[in-house]
Amino acid sequence: MGRHKLKKFAQNKERAYIIEEGKPLYDNIKGNWRKEVFKNDNPIVLELACGRGEYTTGLAQVYPDRNFIGVDIKGDRIWKGGNVVDEKGLTNAAFLRIHIQNLANYFEAGEVDEIWIVHPDPRPKDRDAKRRMTHPRFLNIYKELIKEGGLIRFKTDSKELFEYSVETLVQEKVQLEAVTFDLYESDLMEDHHGIKTRYEKQFTELGHKVHYLKFRF
């Protein structure tokens, strides 16, 4: 492991708002996010596979009365989000370093109010279908953790993944609230407050359309 990455991981260990293996809260955070991390009773919003946490930190600035948690396994990416937390002095943004399939070990049923899934890996190969973040096995996890009626938002530039996701959601009989194959030409732009991930900026510069939907169980 390179020296720069080791330095980033060392900084992550010093940041109390980054929950990861080896820290005291890691094994006891389930059901305790509001009490132990945020010190308030505000709604909890997750950004899954958050990467650099552009939505975690961006939305935290837009909605100071909500708590935002970016979830990802990549510590060096979370480190970048942590830099924004520090620079902006955010007290309503945190990160959890885990694999997404283990979410139920870190949140109680109904503890989560809203979920964002922004430009996840499209997993285009058929053999990887179970790893797509709108596959039924993941939907079942979200359904367990999110409060009744809680909103889930999904955004991607992959038309194939988006079509798969819409088909899956219809099959699972969830309540689709909105669907667009071209976010930037729709009336749903306000949902995103102009926030773009690093990859989204690259995709849109190449002319890719951004697809977006939101649903509830």
Image (tube, grey):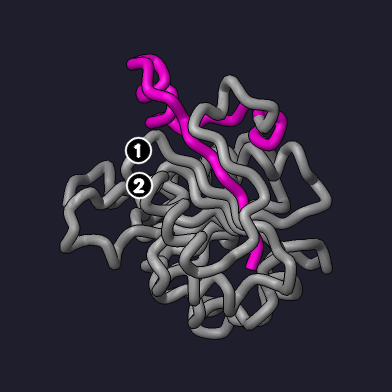
Answer with left or right where residue 95 lies relative to residue 39. left
Location of mark 1 (residue): 158
Q: Which residue is painted at 49% across and 56% down in the image? A: 48
- From the top left corner, tell me how far across and down residue 2 is, in percent: 18, 46
Label 2 CA crowd tier, 10 Å (few <14, some 14–19, many 20+): many
Answer with left or right where residue 62 lies relative to residue 206. right
Residue 82, magenta (yes or no):
no
Residue 198, magenta (yes or no):
yes
Q: Amino acid at mark 1?
A: Ser
- From the top left corner, tell me how far across and down residue 87 is, in percent: 61, 35
**Magenta residues?**
189-217
Q: Nearer the viewer, residue 96 or 199?
A: 199
Q: Which residue is painted at 63% across and 25% down in the image? A: 186
Location of mark 2 (residue): 161
Label 1 CA crowd tier, 10 Å (few <14, some 14–19, many 20+): many
Badge 2 vs badge 1, beta-carbon distance below 8 Å: yes
Q: Quadrant of residue 208?
A: top left
Query: Regarding mark 1 in the picture, which secondary structure is present there?
Result: loop
